[in-house]
Structures are given as C-alpha cells and as structure tokens.
Image (cartoon, helix red, strand yellow):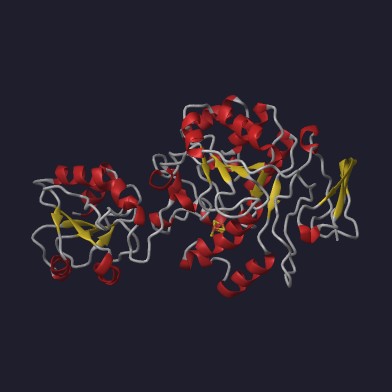
C-alpha cells in the first residue's frame, strides 16, 4: 500500500528503503488513498506553495515485522541529495548567537537546514516558534505528537494553527500495539500509580524518536525560565544530547532553542502583538500544556511546571523529551560530572545555622514523641542539582529562623544512608524536606517544589 498525494505532477518515493517502491504523487488540491497505501486516512491535503518543495519523511524508522502498525503518520517524501558531513562547533555557534533575537536564530536554523529541520509543536505558547518561522519568509515544517490523550481544546487549536498559517502539521502517533499492551496490562491511568515515564515513553518519546530519525535538526520551545532546575542551562543551539538524527549515532542531530533566553511574559506579549491564535486552555489558567490527565491549571504565582505531573517529585519533572537536561545518577549514586578529581564531592548547606545530623541523630529525632523544639531537616545529596539549586535559599531560611525556636538541620541521605532514608524518612528523591513537629513523632513532608525562603517559612509557620 502506498500514499497517493496527487499534485503538481511531482512523483515522490519514500526515502525508507523498506518503502522504496511506495511511490506517491503530490497534488495541491486533493489526496486520494491508492490500493498501495494504507498509512494515512483519506483527507484533503493542501500545501502552501512554499511547502510544496521536497520534504523528507519525518518517520524514517523501518517497518517492524509483525506490527499491525507498519509506521504511523508517515509523510511520504522524496529523497534528498546527500550532503557532505558538516563539522561545526555548535558550542561556539551558541555563544555567537546568545544575544541574537529568536527571529534571527530561527532564520539561521531554517537557512542552514532547509527541509531537514522541523519545529516541534506542543500546542501551547510554542506557537511563537511557528510565528517566528512564518516571519522569516522561509519554508518550514512543523510536527506534533498526538498522544491520544490531549485536551479537545488542543486539537481545536492545532486545527486553528493549520488554517492560520496554511500548513499541515505532521502528526506523529504512538504505536497502537504498544499502547494496547500498556493499557490492557496497567489500565488507562497507570501514570498516577507508578509514574509517567512508561506512558510517556510509549505515547511521546518513541514517536518523537521516530520523527527525529528523519531530520538533521529540530526546533524546540524550551526556555530557561520554564523549569529552573532542569532547563536553566538551555543553549540556543546544541548537539542533541539524547536523540539521533538522519545519519544515526550520537551527534547526528542538532537542537535549536530559539526562545531559550526569552521570558514567558515576553512570549505572551509577542503572541498578543502578532495576533497569533492561542490554545483556549490558557484562558482557564493552564500555562504548560500537555496531555489532559497530566496537566492542570496553576494558581497565580505558581510555577508553570507545577501544572504537570504534580503528583510526582521534582526530579522526574521531565518527560524524557529533553532528558539531557537532567544529569543521570550513576550506579554508585553520584553524578560523574560533579565529582572532584579525587572522587570526592563538596558538601553543601554549610552554615552555622544548619545542624549537620548523623544517622544516630536522625534516629533519635524519629524516636522522640515530645521534642523540646520542632525541627526542619533537608535530606540531600551534594551532587544533586536540585539540592544545589536550593542551597542559598535554605541557608538564608536557616538564618532567618535563628532564635525562633525551630531547629534547622541537614542529613546527607545518599550512599549508605539511602535505604534508611527511603524506609524511615519518606525519601523519594532529592531534596526531601521534613518537618518534625514538637508533639508528634511523625515527620511531615514538604510537598511543594517551591523551595524559596518565603515558601519554606510559610510551611514552618503553618505547622509549628
Ligand atoms: Fe501519558 Fe501523561 Fe505522558 Fe501523556 S503526559 S504520555 S498521558 S504520562
């Protein structure tokens, strides 16, 4: 079976060798299924003149034998001339572009990669990327992951964007066999029970991986202010640390983040100024938008990432899509890049206002039913970037509480202490903050991801 896009008398064949004989024709006004194609349902396909140029298949994954889903969301496309391998210093390029506007960065990206780059569109305010691409006047491509769990508002928004820009979004769908296996085994809402990683892997990461295998570069809406812990180092361009591109292997894909340095407010000012369509969920308090069961509105003052996977701990607050932002914990529990040359790692939370608790100290604290003073204790690992990120505020918080009667402590809970901390101290991830009330043996876990001085102070004031 093959796709039949009848248009402009251009005959295309899929670039995938397994589909080499799947010849398609493209027409700017109509799209017809032929007896050689079952990959895309019949629909009218309109392409803008700009986009009627050669397009490489987003999905370059070869057909899997035995699957009833040969390869979802294929956009059949012509072969593209082989280019010589380009060796470029992307760190230097990122430095050169650090002060460039998003429009300049977008223009550079599209100029450099032509139809081998595509914008990843989530259906939220990253519509700004599409507007910037549109403003360059260059042809551009957009793809999106349809997880099957999006809000109806998001689907309507996709449609509005397609109409506004006269484009077709290249949707990527999960493998139905994998979704079926997951849902039949674990139910529709397994992510509330055992975390979002597995479902995201099936519905998002694998389709994304397939999409990227057909590209040499992609464009994301990642911003430094979206997740202070994990995205504070996002460069405007980088060799993708996680995914592979067309040529395969590490370093084969480049990731462009044109709005890395733009604040959320400025994105919204831009969208308003340019009268760009927006997802109606934003008017209901949604900031970050993803799948319906895993996204919620946030209150004024709450960080946008608190609207995603709110039932999980902060460390897991990345979908795997931009996993390179999180330094993986190695087998021995340390992050290799924070280790000193001699294998040691500097301690953190060093302040005379913070008491360093040992294992017996913690055991004592747990045993007491009638403490002289309440305690607040951070369970930490010095190599953990989230602990490092809250160090300054915790030190200031301890200083502020000096003389208040509340004791502030720290307990290093990695390595040999990890199992104890997991069993006895509710340690799920680092950092975990516990309040030990004066008249109760049971510690109360601080569940917010806001670890600034005011939030910690409010927590203690509410419980002491
Ligand atoms: Fe599944 Fe939620 Fe991830 Fe969507 S965001 S893929 S529903 S876990």
User: Which residue is most to the bottom?
Assistant: 185
Q: Residue 242's spot in the image, x, y percent?
A: 52, 53
417 vs 19, left or right, is left
User: Which residue is most to the top?
Assistant: 273
For this rendering, which residue is in front, 377 or 142? 142
Q: Residue 399's spot in the image, x, y percent?
A: 15, 43
Q: Quadrant of residue 412?
A: bottom left
204 vs 381, left or right, is right
The C terminus lies in quadrant: bottom left
Q: Residue 30's spot in the image, x, y percent?
A: 88, 44
418 vs 273, left or right, is left
Q: Residue 411's spot in the image, x, y percent?
A: 20, 60
Q: Quadrant of ligand 1?
A: bottom right
Residue at 39% x, 58% y is 313
Q: Is residue 425 at least partly visible in the picture?
A: no
Q: Is residue 194 at least partly visible in the picture?
A: yes
Residue at 58% x, 67% y is 188
The N terminus lies in quadrant: bottom right
For this rendering, which residue is in front, 336 or 313? 336
How many numbered tags mark residues here?
Answer: 0
Q: Quadrant of residue 16?
A: bottom right
Q: Quadrant of residue 3?
A: bottom right
């Amino acid at each position: 079976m093959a796709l039949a896009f009848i248009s402009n008398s251009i005959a295309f064949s899929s670039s995938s060798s397994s589909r080499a004989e799947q010849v398609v024709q493209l027409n700017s006004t109509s799209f017809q299924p032929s007896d050689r194609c079952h990959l895309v349902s019949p629909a009218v396909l309109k392409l803008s003149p700009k986009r009627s140029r050669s397009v490489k298949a987003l999905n370059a994954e070869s057909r899997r034998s035995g699957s009833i889903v040969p390869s979802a969301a294929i956009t059949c496309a012509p072969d593209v001339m082989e280019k010589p391998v380009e060796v470029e210093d992307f760190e230097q390029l990122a430095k050169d572009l650090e002060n460039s506007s998003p429009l300049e960065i977008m223009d550079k990206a599209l100029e450099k990669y032509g139809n081998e780059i595509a914008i990843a569109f989530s259906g939220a305010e990253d519509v700004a990327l599409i507007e910037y691409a549109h403003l360059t006047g260059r042809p551009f491509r957009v793809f999106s992951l349809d997880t099957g769990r999006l809000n109806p508002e998001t689907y309507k928004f996709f449609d509005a964007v397609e109409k506004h820009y006269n484009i077709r979004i290249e949707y990527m769908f999960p493998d139905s066999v994998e979704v079926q296996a997951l849902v039949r085994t674990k139910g529709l809402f397994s992510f509330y029970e055992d975390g979002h990683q597995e479902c995201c892997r099936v519905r998002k990461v694998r389709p994304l991986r397939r999409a990227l295998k057909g590209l040499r570069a992609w464009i994301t809406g990642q911003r430094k202010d979206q997740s202070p812990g994990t995205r504070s180092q996002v460069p405007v361009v980088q060799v993708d640390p996680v995914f592979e591109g067309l040529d395969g292997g590490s370093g084969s894909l480049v990731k462009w983040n044109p709005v890395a340095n733009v604040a959320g407010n400025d994105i919204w000012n831009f969208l308003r100024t340019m009268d760009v369509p927006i997802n109606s969920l934003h008017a209901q308090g949604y900031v970050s938008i993803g799948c319906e069961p895993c996204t919620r509105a946030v209150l004024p003052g709450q960080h946008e990432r608190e609207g995603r996977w709110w039932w999980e701990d902060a460390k897991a607050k990345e979908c795997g899509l931009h996993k390179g932002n999180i330094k993986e914990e190695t087998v021995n529990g340390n992050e290799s890049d924070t280790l000193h040359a001699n294998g040691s790692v500097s301690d953190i939370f060093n302040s005379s206002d913070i008491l360093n608790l040992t294992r017996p100290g913690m055991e004592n604290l747990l045993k007491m039913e009638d403490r002289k003073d309440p305690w607040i204790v951070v369970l930490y690992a010095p190599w953990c970037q989230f602990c490092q990120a809250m160090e300054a505020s915790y030190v200031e918080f301890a200083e502020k509480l000096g003389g208040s009667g509340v004791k502030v402590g720290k307990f290093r809970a990695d390595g040999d202490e990890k199992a104890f901390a997991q069993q006895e101290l509710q340690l799920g991830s680092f950092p975990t903050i516990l309040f030990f009330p004066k008249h109760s043996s049971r510690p109360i876990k601080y569940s917010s991801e806001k670890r600034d001085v005011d939030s910690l102070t409010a927590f203690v004031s509410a419980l002491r």
